[in-house]
Image: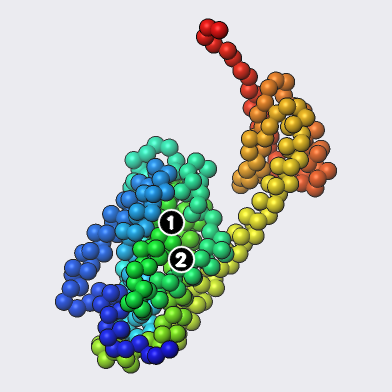
Amino acid sequence: MPFASTADVARMRDQLFFEGDHQSAKLTRFWLLLVLAAIIAASGVLADSTATVIGAMIVAPLMVPILGIVLAVVLADRTNLLRCFGLVLTGSIAVVAVGWLVGLMVHSPVIATTNSQVAARVTPRLIDLIAALATGAVGSIALAREDISDTLPGVAIAISLVPPLAVAGLTLESGHRSEAFGALLLFMTNVSAILTAGLIVMTVYRVRGEVFPDAATGSGIHRRRAIAVIVAGMVVISIPLAFTSRRIATSRSTESKITVVADGWARASHWEIASVVTRPEGVLIRATGPSPEPDATALGSALAAAGVGNEHITIQLIPSRSVEVGAR
């Protein structure tokens, strides 16, 4: 594969760096779009609207300075590296703040148990890192190759940047710090994946600082050290993701075993299992049916026989009955 040409590097600098005669206009556009994207994302989460959240993903400009960090590293451009890093950091804080402020407008807590948009972003797993790596690679390739730049809207939708930050702000305002941490972890996962995949793509396309003379306008950086920091960051982030993945897999296996046993117990009394959900305090079984209520002790014995008796299980019995009203 040929080296990236001077024209290619100049085009990428123009797309990603906030410098030159249009620096002020680029910064104004960045902050305007970011604040609007944050409001759209927070509103979409509150409304539990997937379409609205996707709209925020398309509008959000955070991908630009993140890829700018990648380009600044490979060009050894300290000035633009610090500028892009500062934009990512301050922009992230701004989105969290917007989410927190929007959360003040509602009285009920915005948490995973009542909102599917929150639930989808507070338990990141290793598969999220793998998907983010692939998406970051596509975005970097679209940047390096002008002929496939039309894929960028799809990349914006696939990589979740602003929505998890908005969720972090909303859940912080609701007092659920653990869920806010999970949303921030998802954001950091996506950022580290974009940086790592971007570095790999830039290496494949052999983008180098020497190609573009103006890359030396800023003081240099130690390229290998910066790359090592980015890769190390992704490795560190993968550790809690691995623990989360294992915990979710274990919970789903336990829920499946409990559901099989509980279904048999419920059918014997003409009841049915409405849900089996793992919560921080244990597993909650919701069952519904006509009076009289089935013997919960029998279910406990059956679960113990199936090897899941050591779990902390709560059985919620919800009686139901039919009432006829109106003329016949």
Percent x, y of residue 12 = 30, 79
Percent x, y of residue 47 = 39, 42
Is residue 176 visible in this depiction of the protein? no
Residue at x-position 29% and y-position 88%: 6
**Quarter holding residue 103:** top left
Residue 272 vertical placement versus 322 (above, below): below
Percent x, y of residue 83 = 30, 74
Residue at x-position 71% and y-position 42%: 259
- Residue 190: assigned label: 2
Q: Is residue 61 left or right of residue 299?
A: left
Q: Could you tell me which quadrant the C terminus lies in?
A: top right
Q: Earlier in the sequence, mark 2 or mark 1?
A: 1
Q: Is residue 261 left or right of residue 92?
A: right
- Residue 21: assigned label: none
Percent x, y of residue 140 = 40, 75
Residue at x-position 81% and y-position 43%: 304
Residue lying at the far left of the rendered structure: 21
Q: What type is the residue that disc 2 sits on?
A: Asn
- Residue 164: assigned label: 1
Is residue 135 visible in this depiction of the protein? yes
Q: Are marks 2 and 1 in contact (CB under 8 Å)?
A: yes
* Label 2: how many Cα within 10 Å (few below 14, some 14–19, many 20+): many
Q: Mark 1: which secondary structure?
A: helix
Residue 151 vertical placement versus 311 (above, below): below
Q: Mark 2: which secondary structure?
A: helix
